[in-house]
Amino acid sequence: MQKNIFLASYPKSGNTWLRSIIGNFYKFGKDFSLNDLKSIPLLSIKKHFDEFENKIYIENNELHFDWVSQNIIQCQHLLNTKSNHLNIFKTHSVRHKKFTNETVNAGFIYIVRDPRDIVVSFKNFTGKDFDEIINELLFEKKLMIGSNGIQELLSTWELNVQSWLNYSTVPRLIIKYEDLQLKPKSIVLKIKDFLNKIHKLKLNLNDHEIDQIIENTSFNNLKKLENRSGFDEATKHSKFFRSGTSNQWKDILSKSQIKLIEKNLQSMMKYFNYI
């Protein structure tokens, strides 16, 4: 039985960009489209629990978070058993002890982004105001995020990042959004080598093919594809691929907002050389 791989992150940190790169690894040579991202779905969606009995629901026909937490590792067992190919799942969940473990998970890639830029990106994506987003990112330990009938425990930015850094019983690759921007070839090669190592996938892509994947999945090209055909992960507030740049926060956030973020996230931001 093969085990799954997670692509994990706090929202608006580059998870979808990462999915596009990995999706292009496996479909290289075919016309790349945003539909290819569907091959790397969220784990936490209702259809993955179709075979379970005695499901517990809350309002809006959503599955109860506690029930999902009790069954999500078994869910991964079933998905791994049913699949004859590699399962890769996206998640924004904090890695609490019931979410996944080495019995079902072969490893993970976590992509982290400067939280000050996340605030700006989240503002445009959700339509919430900056102070509300900053409060959630810094202090809402029980913050949930959901779609497709299931809630994930997002928690704060710091706890989300730390929970995956502390998950050391499986192979992992931690990458920075900013490094993917500045040195895409180096990071894309690391991703390829990581996947080859933990699943022996033999992604034998040459130098030219890697360059083509980087071009296919550049932010500008993803933006063009969304403008041409739309993207079902966009919201009424904003297109999904809006800016993609770093250091937007310098011209947008107030001094007091920046100070609040840096004061409360000082240790983790220093760890990733954001301050």
Image (spheres, rainbow, N blue to C red):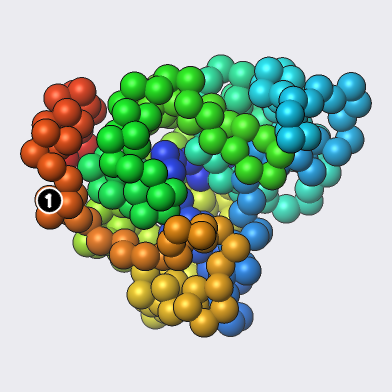
Which sits in the foreground, 215 or 66? 66
Q: Position of residue 91 (x, y in %)?
A: 55, 40
Q: Position of residue 195 (x, y in %)?
A: 51, 51
For disc 1, the marked residue is 250
Taking 237 as reference, is 219 above or below it?
A: below
Q: Is residue 195 shown left or right of residue 158?
A: right
Q: Furthest residue to the left?
A: 255
Total marks placed: 1
Q: Position of residue 65 (x, y in %)?
A: 67, 23
The image quadrant of residue 9 is: top left
Q: Residue at x 67, y 47 (%)?
A: 87
Q: Quadrant of the C terminus?
A: top left
Q: Amino acid at mark 1?
A: Lys
| Res. 183 in view | yes
Dot 1 crowding, Cα within 10 Å, few <14, some 14–19, many 20+: few
Q: Position of residue 154 (x, y in %)?
A: 48, 30
Taking 209 as reference, is 268 above or below it?
A: above
Q: Residue at x 84, y 25 (%)?
A: 55
Which sits in the foreground, 127 or 249? 127
Q: Is residue 271 shown left or right of residue 26?
A: left
Q: Is residue 237 shown left or right of residue 220?
A: right
Q: Is residue 178 shown left or right of residue 74?
A: left
The image quadrant of residue 74 is: top right
Q: Residue at x 78, y 34 (%)?
A: 61
Q: Residue at x 13, y 42 (%)?
A: 254
Which sits in the foreground, 183 or 243? 243
The image quadrant of residue 168 is: top left
| Res. 266 in view | no
**Secondary structure beneath disc 1?**
helix
Q: Quadrant of the N terminus?
A: top right
